[in-house]
Image (cartoon, rainbow, N blue to C red):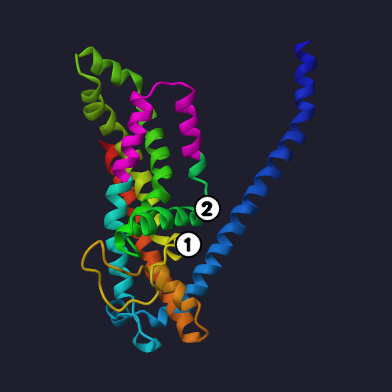
Amino acid sequence: MQTMESQQMVKRLPKRILKNKLINGLFLVATIFSLSILVVLLARIIMQGYSWLSLDFIQNFASRRPEEAGVKAAIIGTLWMMAVVAPVSCILGVGTAIYLEEYARKNKLTRFIQMNISNLAGVPSVVFGLLGLTIFVRALALGNSVLAAGLTMSLLILPVIIVAAQEAVRSVPKELKEASYGMGATKWQTILRVVLPVAIPGILTGSILALSRAIGETAPLVVIGIPTFVAFLPGSILDSFSALPMQIYNWTSRPQEEFHALAAAGIIVLLVLLLLMNSIAVWIRNHFQKR
């Protein structure tokens, strides 16, 4: 009986090897196609905008003359907005994840909340813009300020941070928690001194990648009416401002070719910021994993 099964397996072997090679080739083609599109896009942006990159481009305000236009107000405005987004989204997101994983009862209500949080992570960003327009801009009368934009962007990335933090907290070995309880520690002491130190690489990595998304989003800012042309710097979180995505959106909507090149230069600056944040995320993850 075993001999017959072995013979059948030998007969099927060439077909299985061929199937494996076909699937391997399909994945390779998909990878090459995706990377090719990315390389073409990056090459076009760099070729179009590289000649406009200069120190004056970084230091100048927006202008109706392409040769005098810059991204100073947009960069500073983006940093102001992220100064609101980072603490609000991280504190609320990590706090919610800890509550759902460590304190909340595992019942239908908890599963319903978690299912909705996961669904919110896939909702189009323009929906969060409409939410921010209704709550922060109109109901709370914050206008097109840094605070309104920061809170709207916090809503956008909050589900992503919650899901990432939940996964990180869930991955902490139960043996570590039980050992802490066995030593007489309370639940909060166990979370603070055992769970969070182990989960912090996953939490930080997910949070920084979510913040990177907030930097590049345009639709929510368009919906809440953030200006596309600003020639001043915000003095507080209640002042009006502009951000890099809005500045790029403004330049791409103009008919002159020079502004399209300026938009490409702005995209390069935005990509550098995103790569910098992603590099920090990788470094933090590797640093804490070694510990």
Element marked by disc 1: helix
Q: Magenta residues: mostly which secondary structure?
A: helix
Task: Classify the position of the N terminus by image quarter.
Answer: top right
First to last magenta residue range:
90-118
Q: Nearer the viewer, residue 230 or 20?
A: 230
Q: In the image, what residue type sits under mark 2? A: Pro
Task: Classify the position of the C terminus by image quarter.
Answer: top left
Q: Position of residue 28 (x, y in %)?
A: 62, 51
Q: Position of residue 181 (x, y in %)?
A: 25, 15
Residue 286: in sight, yes or no? Answer: no
- Badges 2 and 1: C-beta atoms under 8 Å apart? yes
Q: Which residue is at a point 26% across and 63% down the rendered structure image? A: 238
Q: Is residue 116 magenta?
A: yes
Alpha-carbon neighbours of circle 1 within 10 Å: few (<14), some, or many (≥20)? some
Extreme residue in the top direction: 1
Badge 1 is on which residue? Answer: 219
Q: Position of residue 57 (x, y in %)?
A: 32, 80
Above or below, 45 against 199 in this view is below
Number of labels in the image equals: 2
Alpha-carbon neighbours of circle 2 within 10 Å: few (<14), some, or many (≥20)? few
Q: In the image, what residue type sits under mark 1? A: Ala
Asked whether, in this view, residue 83 is left or right of residue 274, the answer is: left
Badge 2 is on which residue? Answer: 124
Asked whether, in this view, residue 40 is left or right of residue 130, the answer is: right
Q: Is residue 86 magenta?
A: no
